[in-house]
Amino acid sequence: MYHVLRIVLYKVWVVSTLTLFSSVIVFWFYGFLTALLVFTLGMTGILYSAQDLLLYYPNDPPDSRAFVLQPSNYKLPYESIKIINKDGFKIHMFLIKQMTNSSLKPTMIFFHGNAGNMGQRLSNVSGFYHKLDINILMVEYRGYGLSEGTPSEYGLYSDAQAAFDYLMQRTDIDPTKIMLFGRSLGGAVAIDLASRLEYRSKIWALVVENTFTSIPDMAQIILKWRCLLWLPECCHKNKYVSIKKIVHVMAPTLVVCGSNDALVPPSMAKELYMKCGAICKKLIVMPGGGHDDTWTCRDYYTSVQQFLINVPSLSENMGPFFDDVTKDSANRHSIVHTV
């Protein structure tokens, strides 16, 4: 708790100082109890507002907002695109298309984690490009990389929707084969998009990796404060409650997790899998995979590829990945593949 408070107070020291100074003034004129109330309310407001500082790290490493590695560094053909989202911010994206028959290939929308920028994920994206033979649209959230604005839960959801809408307007992309990929925080963004009524029937497949059930659940694991068990959800500025949203996902879904993920417990992946509303779904546990390096595990790309190859036939022919029970059944068969 001390470590978290120290980080928050350091990053918002001006407001913290004003709060402390105001409390001293109130104490001088109105006494201890009133000053304590002012101090408590002030610190509560600071901690609520500062939750963004504990979740979003667009400046890690420090040059992440100024320098974004280009796909050309990996010899990938690409377009650097900037679109205007509905809030008026310019959102930066890379569209990496296959050199031949790109309009016939699936297109992945890639949502990265909470730190750095999309250029730092190009090694992984290069693997997807070459080994899965797909197009990839990399999305830079507001407040990250060269995108304008400030990150927020609503903002990231809005940026994801803007990226999907942009792809649907392109004539050189197959609109019936758009898949979503999200790692960690990006998984929560992908799940939100895939669960929305206006989008869920348009998504061909969903792949999430090392993502969490919700931010309140993660707060309990990381901070280990017992008081968080009784803290109302409204006290969390960022919620990302994927465990409730994934129930509404219809697209064939692959949940991937690393067995050695020290940040997001693999048990959360299993919870998301069990709650997933898709008829076609699969859970893969990658032995030895950590939070940020699961994609380097042996058979990682092969496993994703095998899932995607089966998606069309599964959707049409009721193949082996389908559950034997309906969406609302409480008893689902758990399909866990350890590679």
Image (tube, rainbow, N blue to C red):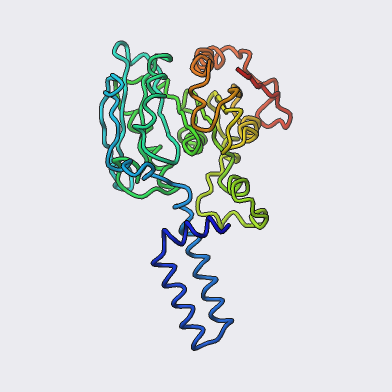
From the viewer's perspective, is 11 left or right of 99? Answer: right
Q: Vertical placement of 11 versus 211: above or below?
A: below
Residue 24 sits above or below residue 270 on the image: below
Task: Pinpoint residue 55: horizontal percent, then vertical percent.
Answer: 47, 48
Quadrant of the rendered image containing residue 234: bottom right
* Number of marks: 0
- Residue 94 percent location from the top left of the image: 31, 29
Which residue is most to the bottom? Answer: 29
x and y, in percent, of residue 255 in the image = 57, 27
Which quadrant: the N terminus?
A: bottom right
- Which residue is pictured at 64% across the width and 50% down the height? 224
Q: From this view, report whether residue 102 is shown above or below residue 261.
A: above
Residue at 61% from the left image edge and 24% from the top image edge: 285
Q: For this rendering, which residue is in front, 328 or 215?
A: 215
Q: Is residue 140 left or right of residue 315?
A: left
Give the quadrant of residue 145. top left
Q: Nearer the viewer, residue 1 or 333?
A: 1
Q: Quadrant of the C terminus?
A: top right
Q: Position of residue 74 (x, y in %)?
A: 31, 21
For image coordinates 39% across by 67% down, the residue present is 14
